[in-house]
């Protein structure tokens, strides 16, 4: 009897051990699946880290080539065409105050300036009132009319060489009226030559320019050669470019000349006659004129100033420029 009980107990113990063994086997099998999943997740994390590292390396290479977020001129979309951006500013007779001219950048696209330049064209005219018949007035164009003049006097190589003696030339064949060039009034400088201080301003969203007055001797090179800019200057659509020009002297200034010089019974040439023999004005001795100068001189000029470069023609809505 006792043997049968012991066998039953042993059988029960073996069954319990088998059950536990199977439970342990199932647990181990579950852990294996979990470990396999963890291995897969770790492999994916390793791959993501590798991809992130490669992306960071590409970003570093890009930063080494240029500043991120800055659009270069070469990257602005659009068609490039050569372009001259100019404005005409009238320099009237006797003007010594600031005059200005402005031009807006149109909506076709930005303008990129490469160099700057300027030129002054003479529109010199004079009127002659007949001393014998004051009602008769004739208007003539001076010899410099329509001719371009320098915008500064730094290139004048003949300064300080006035006429040493009174000269009177009679036009061939001798029937024309003479002109008189005298040491008292004949100017040694070029007729209708300008000297200015130029202030350039840009009204718009971009960074302002230097906003200082630049002497016209620095605006160009030599007599009339374009002045290359230090860098490409980009002007956006809608910006307004303004040039403020201060003449340093009036056109063909009369100061420095002597009045009342001439032969007896005559008062020519007068103070404004410094360029008469150059401009083709007859300032000969005229007894009928007395002390009144019959010639009215209008030393007007037009300054053309601006930038040379190119336009980037863009379709509507193409970029911030």
Image (cartoon, rainbow, N blue to C red):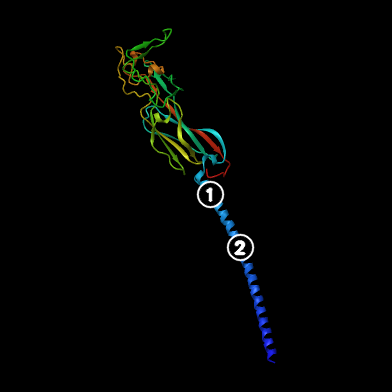
319 in relation to 307, above or below: below
Please, which residue is most extreme toward the front here? 3
Residue at (51, 37) in percent of width and height: 111
Percent coordinates x, y for residue 3 in the rendering: 69, 89
3 in relation to 213, above or below: below
Percent coordinates x, y for residue 279 in the rendering: 41, 18
Other-residue count near label 1 (Cα within 10 Å), few / some / many at <14 / 14–19 / ≥20: few
Please, which residue is most extreme toward the bottom here? 1
Query: Which quarter of the figure is the N terminus placed in?
Result: bottom right
Query: Label 1 belongs to which residue?
Result: 59
- Which residue is more in the foreground, 167 or 59? 59
- Which residue is more in the foreground, 25 or 217? 25
193 in relation to 21, above or below: above
Label 1 secondary element: helix
- Which residue is more in the foreground, 281 or 66? 66
Residue 125 shows in the view: yes
Q: CA distance from mark 1 to mark 2?
A: 30 Å
The part of the image, by quadrant, that contains residue 160 is top left
Residue at (50, 37) in percent of width and height: 112
Percent coordinates x, y for residue 220 in the rendering: 43, 29
Q: Report the mark closest to the observer, 1 or 2.
A: 2
**Which badge, 1 or 2, comes first in the chain's sequence?**
2
Residue at (56, 51) in percent of width and height: 54
Residue 70 shows in the view: no
In the visual, does 51 lie left or right of 135?
right
Label 2 secondary element: helix
Percent coordinates x, y for residue 157 in the rendering: 38, 20
Query: Label 2 belongs to which residue?
Result: 39
């Amino acid at each position: 009897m006792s043997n049968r009980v012991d066998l039953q107990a042993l059988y029960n113990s073996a069954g319990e051990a088998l059950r536990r063994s199977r439970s342990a086997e199932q647990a181990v099998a579950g852990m294996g699946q979990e470990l396999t999943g963890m291995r897969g997740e770790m492999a994916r994390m390793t791959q993501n880290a590798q991809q992130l590292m490669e992306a960071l390396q590409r970003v570093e290479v890009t930063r080494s080539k240029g500043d991120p977020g800055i659009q270069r001129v070469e990257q602005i979309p659009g068609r490039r065409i050569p372009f001259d951006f100019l404005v005409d500013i009238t320099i009237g007779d006797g003007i010594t105050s600031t005059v200005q001219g402005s031009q807006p950048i149109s909506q076709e696209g930005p303008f990129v300036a490469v160099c700057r330049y300027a030129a002054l064209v003479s529109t010199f005219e004079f009127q002659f009132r007949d001393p014998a018949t004051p009602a008769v007035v004739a208007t003539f164009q001076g010899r410099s009319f329509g001719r371009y003049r320098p915008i500064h006097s730094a290139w004048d190589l003949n300064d300080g060489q006035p006429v040493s003696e009174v000269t009177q030339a009679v036009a061939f064949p001798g029937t024309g009226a003479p002109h008189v060039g005298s040491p008292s009034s004949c100017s040694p400088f070029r007729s209708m030559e300008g000297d200015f201080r130029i202030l350039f301003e840009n009204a718009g969203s971009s960074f302002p320019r230097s906003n200082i007055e630049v002497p016209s001797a620095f605006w160009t090179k030599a007599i009339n050669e374009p002045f290359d800019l230090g860098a490409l200057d980009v002007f956006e659509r809608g910006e307004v470019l303004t040039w403020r020009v201060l003449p340093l002297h009036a056109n063909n200034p009369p100061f420095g000349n002597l009045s009342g010089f001439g032969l007896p019974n005559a008062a020519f040439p007068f103070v404004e006659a410094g360029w008469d023999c150059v401009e083709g004005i007859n300032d000969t001795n005229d007894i009928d004129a007395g002390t009144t100068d019959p010639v009215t001189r209008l030393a007007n000029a037009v300054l053309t100033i601006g930038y040379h470069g190119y336009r980037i023609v863009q379709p509507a809505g193409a970029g911030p420029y």
